[in-house]
Image (cartoon, coloured by chain):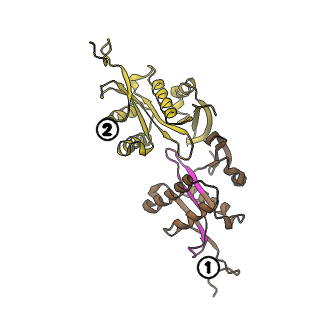
Chain colours: A yellow, B brown
Amino acid sequence: MEPKSSSRKGHFPLGIRPLDPADRSAIEEMVVSSGKFNAEEIATALELVDEALEKGEASGYFFAVLEEEGQKSSVHGYACYGPTPLTQGVYDLYWIVVGPSAQRKGYGRRLLEFVEKDVVRRGGRMVLIETSSQESYGGTVGFYHRAGYALVARIKNFYRAGDDKLIFSKDLIPP
Amino acid sequence: MEPKSSSRKGHFPLGIRPLDPADRSAIEEMVVSSGKFNAEEIATALELVDEALEKGEASGYFFAVLEEEGQKSSVHGYACYGPTPLTQGVYDLYWIVVGPSAQRKGYGRRLLEFVEKDVVRRGGRMVLIETSSQESYGGTVGFYHRAGYALVARIKNFYRAGDDKLIFSKDLIPP
């Protein structure tokens, strides 16, 4: 009987699982090596990891970690999301990152679909994503559009002069 | 010599000062009696008060309290604001509340002008205000417009179905 967790090519099938303390360094490496985030943003990403490791779901930050199954050293991406304070049924997708060596394989889409299903399971109705117009040069906007997100707001010069905040949203349940 | 802190009508002139532990109950009473906020919002308002009392400006929440000078029991309104994370020079105005018995006296405008001056003093360039489209029935939108704020975004059904998030912004320094 073949072990279920190995594929013919010697890679393991991908799985999505909750956060594990061992993921912190992998997440740091992914966020840093993506080259998309500045020092303050990287620190923020890791603060959310630490909050979630310390308090679990009470932190308000839920994590989905994409890895080759059973291979904790093979984390290829992650998403961080949680209920938007003061709303009924809205969730923020705070972070979605795929490692530089794992780009263009549909991993981001896979993480996003996982998040959306989990939000619906938790009774959510809408996902919001805030991102930088600078970051969008990397194809982020196209990624969200293809996944059914609409650009619903732009705050000009939000991050700094010439760098706007874009807000995307998707109704998971028709309003 | 007349004491400087009393006016002819027996009222004290108004002053704006930082947060004091004794303000917590006055702020709670104002937020509750305004009738504009639900239980979760009231809890959030008081969490920010507690954070600021505990950590000072390191909390990221700055308070401006409007009172009759020297009369700590005569708090008529307050504002809570602070630097918007991940931005350069943007400040969020999180709360601005004037007690029900002190409406229509220009106190809100006075608090807002104090906040704007303080933001500029701290090197800020823009103030953002997020509010509910439901709350706007109470004249909030007109208040912000008259003070020079532009409605820059609307997230439909954000708080709940039919209750949108409105985002107002004002450039304190031309972009």
For mark 1, what is the residue? B5
A164 displayed left or right of A61 = right
In the picture, which quadrant includes the C terminus of chain B? top right
Q: Is residue A151 visible?
A: yes
Foreground pick, A133 / B67: B67
Give a yes or no on whether discs 1 and 2 share a subunit: no
Q: Is residue B122 visible?
A: no
Q: Which chain contains the residue that carries disc 1?
A: B
Q: Tell me if residue B67 is in the magenta stretch.
A: yes
| In this view, A167 is above or below B101 | above
Closer to viewer: mark 1 or mark 2: 2
In the picture, which quadrant includes the N terminus of chain B? bottom right
Q: Judging from the image, what secondary structure is the residue with disc 2 in?
A: loop
**What x and y, as percent, mark residue B104?**
72, 64
Q: Residues within 10 Å of mark 2 (few under 14, many from 20)?
A: few
Give amino acid for label 2.
Answer: Pro
**What x and y, as percent, mark residue B26?**
56, 67
Q: Which chain contains the residue that carries disc 2?
A: A
A61 displayed left or right of B90 = left
For mark 2, what is the residue? A21
Q: Tell me if residue A98 is in the magenta stretch.
A: no
Q: Residue at x 47, y 32 (%)?
A: A118
Magenta segment range? B66-95
Q: Residue at x 54, y 30 (%)?
A: A136
| Cα distance between the residues tagged 1 and 2 | 59 Å
